[in-house]
Amino acid sequence: MKNFGSLECPCCHSKEYIRWGFYERGVVYIKEDKEYSETINIQRIRCRSCGRTHALLPFGIIPYKQLTDEVLIELLLNEKEEELFSKEVIDYYKNQFYKYHYSNLSTMLKTRNVREIIKCLKEQKDKILSSYIKEYGKCFMQIKIGCLLYSTS
């Protein structure tokens, strides 16, 4: 049995977990204007109280997406991303942003200007996204609630 600090089960709010294996996950990121992909191991844990399993995602990894939050922010800003991603991919993520996250972020940041919201995200990513997770119970560009996140720092 392991106590993972302040992590709380999203289902029953218990803080008692056991390690429950891991799975491999592909992640796409951009470095020096080139797209890279990497496979990382994601730790799974099981809640001792309700028996549900959860994934411990490193900060910046978005549940159910291969792109990191940093890549998505750049993609939403439209800076050179059309060279790396198809128009369909860009449109998909923009639609996801407007449908599920624009109103939350505009309320949080007290501005309706999309470009300003995205620039704030780029400049203060860790602070804003940590607050977003606490406020709305999900991470940026996550639609389904359920994964636990932790910071690698």
Image (tube, rainbow, N blue to C red):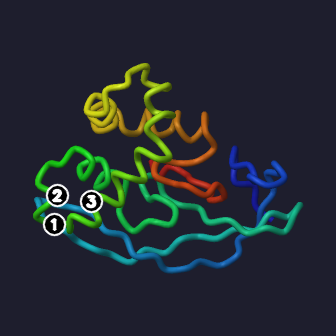
- What's the residue type where badge 2 is placed? Glu
> Which residue occupies the foreground of this view, 129 or 111?
111
Tell me the SS state at disc 3: helix
Q: CA distance from mark 3 to mark 1?
A: 10 Å
Callout 2 touching callout 3 (CB < 8 Å): yes
Q: Which mark is residue 90?
A: 3
Query: Which residue corresponds to mark 1?
Result: 84
Q: Nearer the viewer, mark 2 or mark 3?
A: 3
Q: Position of residue 123 (x, y in %)?
A: 28, 33
Mark 3 residue crowding within 10 angstroms, few (<14) / some (14–19) / many (20+): some
Q: Which mark is residue 81?
A: 2
Tell me the SS state at disc 1: loop
Mark 2 residue crowding within 10 angstroms, few (<14) / some (14–19) / many (20+): many
Q: Which mark is residue 53?
A: none
- What's the residue type where badge 1 is placed? Leu
> Which residue occupies the foreground of this view, 9 or 136?
136
Callout 2 touching callout 1 (CB < 8 Å): yes
Question: Is tag 2's residue or tag 3's residue first in the polypeptide sequence?
Answer: 2
Residue 112, above or below 96: above
Residue 135, above or below 50: above
Q: Position of residue 52 (x, y in %)?
A: 79, 67
Identified at 62% across, 66% down, the residue is 55
- What's the residue type where badge 3 is placed? Ile
Mark 1 residue crowding within 10 angstroms, few (<14) / some (14–19) / many (20+): few
In which quadrant will I find the N terminus? bottom right
